[in-house]
Amino acid sequence: MLLALVLATAVSRALSSDDPETRIVAAHAGGILLGMRLGSALLWPADYGPRALGDAPGHLREAVSRPPVFRRDRSLLESDGDPWTVNVIGHGLFGSEIYLRSRQCGGAPLAAFAWTAGASIAWEYALEGSVKRPSAIDLAWTPIVGGLVLGELRFRAYHSLRSEDPGLLRRIARGLLDPLGSLERAAGAGC
């Protein structure tokens, strides 16, 4: 409960910040987290749906009172019991999306890493923590590989396509590298 309060306070401060870039990154991260939680409820209703929320208080207590899951009898990328595709691709893309938005809004690599780590902690301990214990591999993979590696690669690739007259192919490539950011900028987000 204390963790949820701390996270809610941090998000509230970010959203009420005088810095528009901070508000954009916070809103983007919140939207991604909410979308992931709703998507999980649709894909796995028995585990994440409304009926499962009855067990949320017990799961949240367990999430903050026990260490993250790391099963030594499984491969590293499946050490939390999830398929490697969920951990490698899903958490990699999640981390890169949060990291990229921070970088696109002027954040330095360390600030983008902090946003990514914070979003990963919020997911593992609050949103997913309501149904199962946090995952050690997810807490590490999301900000390090998803953020610092994949997110920074996306950022550099996007910016390498800058041009005074970008042309259709460059605009398409930039849209593919940052689809959500492209939609947000088209809607007037600014960065």
Image (cartoon, rainbow, N blue to C red):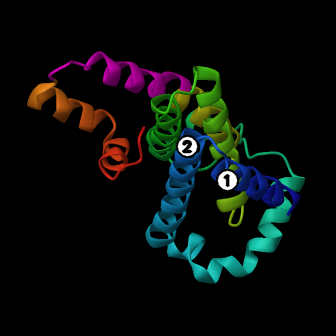
Percent coordinates x, y for residue 135 in the rendering: 68, 46
Percent coordinates x, y for residue 158 in the rendering: 32, 25
Give the total number of marks visible in the rendering: 2
Does the image show residue 133? no
Percent coordinates x, y for residue 113 in the rendering: 62, 29
- What is the number of the mark on residue 127? none
Question: Where is mark 2, residue-wise?
Answer: 20
Is residue 33 rendered to the left or right of residue 9? left
Percent coordinates x, y for residue 85 in the rendering: 44, 43
The span picked out in magenta is 148-165
Q: Give the dominant element type of the magenta stretch: helix, strand or loop.
A: helix
The kind of residue tagged 1 is: Ser
Does the image show residue 66? yes
Q: Residue at x 50, y 43 (%)?
A: 94
Considering only vertical position in the picture, is 16 above or below 53? Answer: above
- What is the number of the mark on residue 16? 1
The kind of residue tagged 2 is: Pro
Between 41 and 28, the residue placed more toward the observer is 28
Image quarter (top left, top right, bottom left or bottom right) of the C terminus? top left
Q: Residue at x 33, y 53 (%)?
A: 187
- Cα distance between the residues tagged 2 and 1: 9 Å
